[in-house]
Amino acid sequence: MTRYRRPEPPGSKYATAEGARRLQEELDYLWRIHRPQVTRAVAEAAAQGDRSENAEYIYGKKQLREIDRRVRYLRKRLDGLVVVSRPPDDRSRVFFGAWVTIEDDEGHESEVRIVGPDEIEPARRYVSMDSPLARALLGKRRDDEVTVEVPGGRRSYLIAGIRYEE
């Protein structure tokens, strides 16, 4: 068994203005506030002597590695990010950033927003534009029917509404 891990396919490089701002805030927090705190804690733990059995030191070093990994990821991600800050000219079709009201076969309605892969929040009904549902919805119009392949089989949805926020 090797330690090699196949690299994840890169997600789409789009984000809403809100999502880009949140990523930038996370980067600023990690780099300016959290990392210096952890660095101080590691330095204090290292000053206690034997580092090989010092749990605070070992955990602090691990935490620093995780922070540095996330900072590298965020910097790389923000460099290539395309921020979509205005709605499309054709608001009758589903594009990035749209709130889409869908109705399933039983008549249950739900509303989802199509966002970038870094902005996924199931509690707020934000779905990635790379997800099967979003890929099926993109480019469609109101009253179009889409079919999505899900683990339990196929599901059909009717697009009941499309809206964009300014």
Image (cartoon, rainbow, N blue to C red):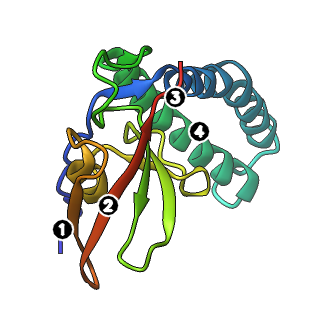
User: Which one is in front, 104 or 118?
Assistant: 104
User: Which secondary structure, mark 3?
Assistant: helix
Label 3 neighbourhood size at 10 Å, few (<14), some (14-19), many (20+)? Answer: some
Q: CA distance from mark 1 to mark 4?
A: 25 Å
| Residue at the disc numbered 1 | 2
Whether residue 54 can be seen here = no
Q: Amino acid at mark 2?
A: Leu
Q: Amino acid at mark 4?
A: Leu
Q: CA distance from mark 2 to mark 1?
A: 46 Å
| Residue at the disc numbered 2 | 158
> Which is closer to the viewer, label 1 or label 3?
3
Q: How many marks?
A: 4
Q: CA distance from mark 2 to mark 3?
A: 28 Å
Q: CA distance from mark 1 to mark 3?
A: 36 Å
> Which is closer to the viewer, label 2 or label 1?
2
Residue 19: image tag: 3
Q: Position of residue 55 (x, y in %)?
A: 72, 59
Q: Amino acid at mark 1?
A: Thr
Quarter residue 161 falls in: top left
Upstream in sequence: badge 4 or badge 3: 3
Q: What residue do we see at 72% from left, 24% from top?
A: 36
Note whether 136 is above or below 139 in the view shown.
below
| Residue at the disc numbered 4 | 64
Q: Position of residue 51 (x, y in %)?
A: 67, 50
Q: Are marks 2 and 3 in contact (CB under 8 Å)?
A: no
Q: CA distance from mark 4 to mark 3?
A: 25 Å
Upstream in sequence: badge 2 or badge 3: 3
Upstream in sequence: badge 2 or badge 1: 1
Q: What residue do we see at 28% from left, 28% from top?
A: 13
